[in-house]
Image: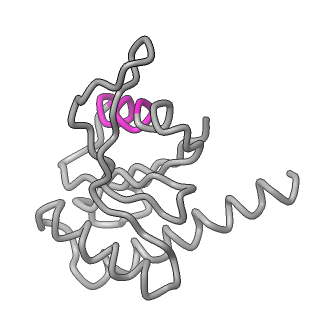
């Protein structure tokens, strides 16, 4: 693994640590918006630059189409976080994040489901 990939893995590991801290404090069962706001706060405390609810247009034949896609969180302009609070992650959730990665040209994403007893079981990493 080259140094660039090690840095990216360290970045996602730190983000996951922040998500675990939020889950440790709140536990499962809240709305996605509560986890989003608390995780954004925790990430900022850790020194990350965090953007919330970023609109993502679709470019079709050179024209911007307003489809109202929204990225939950973007960390350091390098990682998209798609947050869920569902009984289990489905393939549609994975497809959603993969679409966001392709449209945004960001190559790394985390799909995090906070509605699980052990958060590590609710996290999936994606790399384009």
In this rendering, position of residue 125 left or right of residue 2: left
At 45% from the left and 32% from the top, the residue drawn is: 103
In this rendering, position of residue 79 left or right of residue 85: right
Magenta-drawn segment: 91-99
- In this rendering, the count of numbered labels is 0
**Along the line of sight, the residue nearer the viewer: 109 or 53:** 53
Q: Residue furthest right?
A: 2
Determine which quarter of the picture holds residue 123: bottom left
**Along the line of sight, the residue nearer the viewer: 46 or 126:** 46
Q: Quadrant of the C terminus?
A: top right
The location of residue 3, given as percent across then percent down, is 86, 60
Q: Is residue 48 above or below residue 108?
A: below
The location of residue 70, given as percent across then percent down, is 27, 45
Determine which quarter of the picture holds residue 120: bottom left
The location of residue 86, given as percent across then percent down, is 18, 49
At 12% from the left and 67% from the top, the residue drawn is: 30
């Amino acid at each position: 693994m080259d140094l660039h990939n090690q840095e990216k893995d360290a970045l996602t590991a730190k983000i996951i640590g922040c998500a675990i801290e939020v889950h440790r404090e709140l536990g499962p069962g809240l709305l996605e918006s509560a986890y989003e706001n608390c995780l954004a706060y925790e990430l900022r405390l850790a020194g990350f630059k965090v953007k919330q609810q970023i609109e993502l247009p679709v470019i079709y034949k050179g024209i911007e189409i307003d489809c109202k896609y929204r990225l939950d969180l973007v960390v350091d302009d390098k990682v998209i976080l798609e947050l869920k609070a569902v009984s289990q992650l489905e393939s549609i959730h994975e497809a959603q994040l993969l679409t966001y990665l392709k449209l945004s040209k960001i190559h790394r994403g985390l799909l995090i489901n906070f509605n699980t007893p052990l958060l590590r079981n609710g996290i999936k990493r994606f790399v384009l």
